[in-house]
Amino acid sequence: MFRLDGQVAIISGGARGIGEGICEVFLEAGAIVVLWDINDGQAVVDNLKVGDREIFYQRVNVADKGSVDNAVEEVISRYGKIDILINNAGVIRDRSFMKMERQEWDTVLDVNVTSLFITSKAVLPHMIKAKYGRIVSASSINAMRGAFGQTNYCASKAAIQGFTRALCKEVGKHGITVNCVAPGFIKTAMTDSIPEEMLKEGIKQIPIRRIGTPRDMGCAYLYLASKEAGFVNGITLHANGGEYAI
Ligand SMILES: NC(=O)c1ccc[n+]([C@@H]2O[C@H](COP(=O)([O-])OP(=O)(O)OC[C@H]3O[C@@H](n4cnc5c(N)ncnc54)[C@H](O)[C@@H]3O)[C@@H](O)[C@H]2O)c1
């Protein structure tokens, strides 16, 4: 397994689902994990804090500059650096386009895209100073293939890929890489509400014949966050069991 010993990793949306899986895998790899979530993350901290592992929860709204800036300031005074930023927090507000309200569009774009402007701006000065950094953000399989009722979500997840390709050109010279992961069908609270029959049909579309897990995603993020991935920059890692081969 790739190691992150002593590296400080901020993981947004870590209080459940894929984010929780990323926290778990990063802790196993030796990282100091800073869990950001708008909801309570203390239960995850209590669950994952075994032995001498270091995990620290901050209540953060990634779409709010003040909230992010305060959290980053506290991380720097506590640990002195930020090596890794994982922009995993995301939301859906599904509705067919003709019925979609402006508020549903704005919320998804704010939380999924504008947050990257806010979080990256906050951590980059520290990464540039350290001449090292890894930024990895959550895109989605639906950015490429589209999905009914998700014009807002698909637009946001495609924007994340464009942001990634552009920012990587600007900060690479500082030893910082910027990439994203596009998860496929992953078992989380979101997918738990899918009826059994639909789930079975969905799995039939996946060549490896199973749904992905938060740990699968944690491992994909771990690779891109590792020192060893230093020559991989500006990519989207498609982690979908072959469902959408690109
Ligand atoms: N589950 C899937 O199948 C799947 C597939 C493709 C992409 N993704 C993407 O992966 C990411 C994680 O997905 P998930 O299924 O674990 O989602 P989830 O809804 O289970 O968890 C998302 C977490 O983000 C937090 N969050 C929401 N808004 C926030 C904000 N403004 N500030 C801080 N935290 C906030 C939530 O409280 C929650 O803990 C998302 O960006 C999602 O779009 C998921």
Image (tube, rainbow, N blue to C red):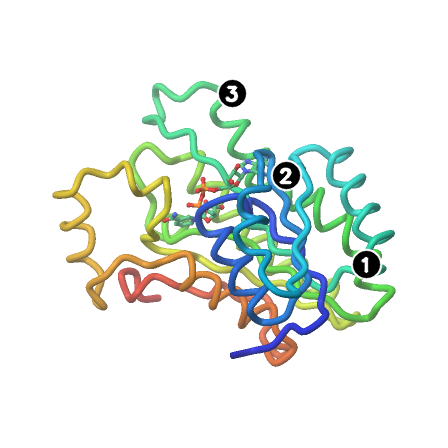
Residue at which label 3 appears: 103
Q: Residues within 10 Å of mark 1 (few under 14, many from 20)?
A: few
Left or right: 37 in relation to 219 = right
Q: Residue at x 51, y 33 (%)?
A: 108
Callout 3, which amino acid? Gln
Q: Position of residue 129 (x, y in %)?
A: 87, 64
In the rendered image, residue 62, in percent from the top left (x then y), is placed at 65, 39
Quadrant including the C terminus: bottom left
User: Quadrant location of residue 132?
Assistant: bottom right
Q: Residue at x 63, y 70 (%)?
A: 30
Q: Secondary structure at mark 3?
A: helix
The front one of 20 and 230 is: 20
Q: Which residue is mark 1?
A: 79
Estimate how packed mark 2 is, as few (under 14), some (14 to 19) or many (20 or more) residues with alpha carbons within 10 Å: many
Q: Name the secondary structure under disc 2.
A: helix
Q: 224 above or below 108?
A: below
Disc on res. 240: none
Q: Earlier in the sequence, mark 3 or mark 2?
A: 3
Disc on res. 114: 2
Please state if 82 lies on the left or on the right of 164 as rendered: right
User: Which tag, 1 or 2, sits closer to the chain's start?
Assistant: 1
First in sequence: mark 1 vs mark 3 = 1
Count of marks, rendered view = 3
> Identity of the amino acid at label 1?
Tyr
> How packed is label 3: few (under 14 Cα within 10 Å), some, or many (20 or more)?
few
Amino acid type of the residue tagged 2 in the rendering: Thr
